[in-house]
Amino acid sequence: MNVNRLTANDLRPAHSRAMSFGRVLGILAGLLGAGTAGAGSWPAMNMPVGVTVLSHSIYDLHMEVLWVCVAIAAIVFGVMIVAMIRFRHSKGAVPDINMTHSTKAEIIWTVIPVLILIAIAIPAAKGILQIEDMRGAGLTIRVTGYQWKWQYTYLGKASGISFFSTLSQSSNFASQLHSGIDPRTVPHYLLSVDHPLVIPSGVKVRLLLTSADVIHAWWVPDFGAKRSAIPGFINELWIKVLPGKEGVYRGQCAALCGRGHAFMPIVVDVKTPADFDKWVAQQKAALKQAAAASAAAAAPNNAPVAKAGAAGRAIEATVHRATRPLMARVLD
Amino acid sequence: MAHAIDTAHDVHAAHDHTLAHDGPATGIKRWLFATNHKDIGTMYLVFSLIMFFVGGSMAMVIRAELFEPGMQFVDPGFFNQLTTMHALVMIFGAVMPAFVGLANWMIPLQVGAPDMALPRMNNFSFWLLPFAFTLLLSTFFVPGGAPAGGWTMYPPLTLQFGDSFPMLIFAIHLMGISSIMGAINVIVTILNMRAPGMTLLKMPLFVWTWLITAYLLIAVMPVLAAAVTMLLTDHFFHTSFFNAAGGGDPMMYEHIFWFFGHPEVYIMILPAFGIISEIIPTFSRKPLFGRNSMIYATASIAFLSFIVWGHHMFVDGMPMAAEMFFMLSTMLIAVPTGVKVFNWTATMWRGSLSFEPPMLFAIGFLFMFSIGGFSGIMLAMVPADFQYNQTYFVVAHFHYVLVPGAVFAIMGGIYYWLPKWTGNMYNMTLAKTHFWLSTIFVNVLFFPQHFLGLAGMPRRIPDYAVQFTDWNMVSSIGGFGFGLTQILFAIAIIQCVRGGKKATARVWDDAAPTGLEWTIPSPAPYHSFTTAPEID
Amino acid sequence: MAQVHAPNADQYYVPHSSPWPIYGSVTLFTIMAGAVATLDGWLPVWSLLPGFAMLAGLFIFWFGTVIKENESGMYNMTVDRSFRLGMMWFIFSEVMFFAAFFGALFYARALVMPWLSGGGTKLLTNILLWSNYHGTWPTNGPAAIGPRANGSFQAVPALGLPALNTAILLTSGITITIAHHALLRGYRRRLAWFLAATFLLGFTFVALQATEYHEAYTRLGLQLGTGIYGSTFFMLTGFHGLHVTIGAIMLFVIWIRVLRGHFTPQRHFGFEAIAWYWHFVDVVWLGLFIFVYWL
Ligand code: HEA
Ligand code: HEA
Ligand code: CUA
Ligand SMILES: [Cu+2]
């Protein structure tokens, strides 16, 4: 098989099994108190701050709640540890058997948590309002989950553009059982696709999520955006990538959807609005060409519509308006 | 005592000459035809231990596959089967039966009853379980393999599975019937069989938490049965409960399932609270602090557990008002749970603490359950849950509350009462080693999963992107260590059953535990309290 | 053996050992295995028979044992109370089982149907996926799933058979209460007659329900597979009908026991348990009549 050539084309320096094993030993040593395991190589352990309005506010909320919990834990665990040190039977501690209740103490430790909870509920509630505010979108894209790929269909001014986004071949080969390919040699292993979603930065992009078969969930951690795609329903989600944060962002399906659940990643290419418009124009031109070509070929082309821009077809209409939708047919 | 046993002898003799003896029946009949709460309790506990090993072995394969990126050992479909079955076996086969086993052994002893209220039904509840799990585990051998849609069994995915599908549904029905009957037995025993003078408020906390748990079980197991029945008819009989085309909704399943599912997680923790509330006062040599508020807190948790289910569905697209409501109600649970944690701490405060194995497990529980609780509170924050949901952060959360939470409490309870059951002390050093190794490894196993989740690793995946490698290796090493350590547990128990230093009636003489169970000899006689004890 | 009829009132009867629980477990397993084999197409439907035959045996033997023990006076009042409490909590579990199906009905009707029709925040669900759908209850969904080619169907009108069935069940609730009072006062003949009336009414209900199902299947286009309405309708009324059938059979058994002289004004757990069960079935029906047929 050609697999070797494929991996030889690799873009990233190989980051070998021995290396990561060594680091793991370092981490374990670190856990035993030997300090951090080699500065700089410590793997990620917190939520990404991300590149959208929402991801920032979620990150802030996450850190706030995290610190609140750490603080409570420090106090509660501290008291427990002091108790275990001071009141040891072996040190001759005498139990105070009359200490059986104290209304005052109990009121205090009911009221204080309530106050803390209110304090963290307020930013959380604000966050909900922000997340659910779908108004003012500049671009709307319909996202349909399939076992196991995504379909992106642009609505509005970019309408007509529609394509599937599937796990890249290199990841696919390497992820086969006993493939013999070291995933560390595959670029963006399991996080790369043939046709990424393309969106502009600085614009509120609204995603309309649905599914053609089972429940999937669309998630890009850097966007702080996750929503389930439920067959028969539309769920909404919005993203606004901060200007200046253009680039490629990656995520994965986040709802168990069968064997291929780990293998339907999401890749989003965020372009500046100008570049995005250029991309749209290109796609539309390609569409026109394709339409002309297929008119010439007369015979309807049943090949998979997997090429970016090749798809003007009303897939959505056929999928969902059928008397029994795809979901039901899958079940039969 | 002698008098009581004599009385029993006379009455039984009068009823049935052939069975006119007080000891257990001989041979296999003792177990197949059992009606004695201790025998049935033992069977539950043994069954649960076996299932813990079965479910744990599946987890070991999961951890082995996740040791490195790439697919090394199993096919992705089989991996999903393992995840699904691991959870079902652990929840319905290991943790719940373990609690029922403890209830069987201890509730009659703690309330001064001669046995469980409905002894034959008790045996029925038990024997359904081996059959239910035979049905469930044999799905591995049918075409298409075991169910692989997650333990939550969401449609439409779960409807896609072939021959295993009805086996899954009927196995759950059997488990449900078993749980409901077990719970009815517990409630009736507690309400009807208490010795004179054992008022409700005097009941030990383990009994109290079980009373409330049994209520939860009877309230929600039928709802699970209904949910899976709807799956069954959607699959085989053309109903449209979860099919939008027919006017149904896959989300409706989620609502019904979690209406069961959330109380279910408290079913797995309330009896644990009860055990901890027994152990900590004993080894602090001091009465439980805030006894009554402990009971009220347990009841509040149970009540709240019915109105928080939506927190499992934040990203699935609920109306905004529902998100707000479920977030706030979920956060409220921290308050009564906090009351419990603070009361335990206050019990230790100004006590006289010693650290026998049960106490070690109880203290481990206090710390690590709280860690799991804190991550629960984080999960309840809707916006943050948009990032946490369906990641290893959730996996870390629930394993903290389930493994060093529920499972540690069970182990602590077993170490607490085992000498009472067998009449022998176990090897303390072995038990303490078991504790320390378990504690170290369980943290190596599950703490890094928080990092993985935050960094973006989804759950329920057999293979992952390379940046997650390091923490997964750490986690797997912890997993293997934790798994191997459990062999010590089995050894400690088997040794103790076989023999050992004789235990006194009070077992923990030095700590002078209170409660009726310590007034009878060790091992507990086959029939205890045939004449009701006096309670001051 | 003298003590058999003069049991020690302090003594809680704990049976020494019993084969029925394990037999019961084997029975349920056999039924489930038969159902699996049928649904998976491994064996024809008759594979369910052995399980159900064993189930009949289970009831006869286990309940027979209990009845015999009871009649020979082995149970004191505490045992009696255990049985009562057990029955009450069992009925509670049944209530929750039905509650789940009612919940499904309300959810589908009050939330899903409006959502699919574009209500609330789900306008786009309607526009993009189901633009021809504007649901009114009863509905079989946007794809009009059902047996007829055009997807139409009719609901069973509340004022026909269902109203009659309501009257029948309510009457049976009264007759069983009369029977109960007769039992308490020791009027055995009245007891027997009213009990007979109760189970006859019960069987009549089942027969009428069967007629209604036949109508629905053949003339109304209303089947289990008729979208969400058919699903909730048949699951709710079906499980209820099953409960009526079981209840009526149990009433019949109780009637035989009455004829044999069982039950005393003080002790009649078996009678009471079934009376409670019957009232429960009655109340569920009222819920069905109101929410499934009427509103
Ligand atoms: C024994 C089982 C158990 C227990 C006890 C809990 C307890 C809690 N759980 Fe957990 N949970 C699970 C088992 C359990 N959970 C499981 C199995 C899942 C996943 C299911 C699946 O998807 O497969 C899950 C998932 C889960 C989710 C969904 C996450 C997601 O899928 O996105 C959420 C969200 O709110 C949640 C919240 C909570 C909360 C708030 C508590 C609270 O009860 C915790 C309360 C305790 C404390 C807070 C600590 C002690 C308190 C103090 C010291 C007082 C002071 C504290 C404060 C003021 C904060 N849990
Ligand atoms: C009470 C419940 C319970 C318990 C006790 C456990 C115990 C463990 N769980 Fe479990 N787990 C769940 C409930 C539980 N889990 C649930 C509900 C899920 C979600 C499923 C879903 O997504 O649907 C889950 C999912 C889950 C996952 C995520 C899978 C995925 O998302 O794909 C992982 C991964 O690490 C995991 C690991 C473990 C491990 C290592 C243990 C260990 O604690 C087990 C330790 C025990 C043993 C190992 C057995 C004893 C020892 C031997 C048999 C000796 C041999 C040992 C060796 C060869 C080393 N569990
Ligand atoms: Cu698609 Cu998981
Ligand atoms: Cu929950």
Image: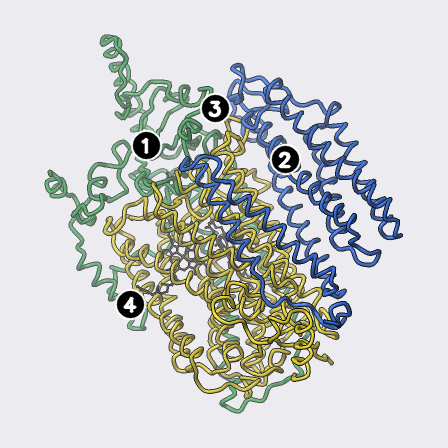
Quadrant of the snapshot with the C terminus of chain C: top right
In the rendered image, which quarter is residue A238 located in? top left
Separation of marks 2 and 1 at Cα, in angstroms? 46 Å
**SS at mark 4 in the image:** helix
Separation of marks 2 and 4 at Cα, in angstroms? 57 Å
Mark in front: 4 vs 3: 3
**Discs 2 and 3 lie in a common subunit:** yes
**SS at mark 1 in the image:** strand
**Amino acid type indicated by mark 1:** Leu
Query: What residue is disc 3 on?
Result: C129
Q: Residue A197 got which mark?
A: 1
In the rendered image, which quarter is residue A114 located in? bottom right
**Discs 4 and 1 lie in a common subunit:** yes
Residue B30, horizontal then vertical, whole percent: 52, 68
Instruction: Reply above or below: B253 against B440.
Output: above
Q: Residue C236 got which mark?
A: 2
**Discs 4 and 3 lie in a common subunit:** no
Q: Tell me, yes or no, whether the two marked residues, 2 and 4, touch with CB atoms within 8 Å.
A: no
Q: Earlier in the sequence, mark 4 or mark 1?
A: 4
Separation of marks 4 and 3 at Cα, in angstroms? 52 Å
Instruction: Reply above or below: A303 against A68.
Output: above
The chain whose colour is green is A
**Discs 2 and 4 lie in a common subunit:** no
Mark in front: 3 vs 1: 3
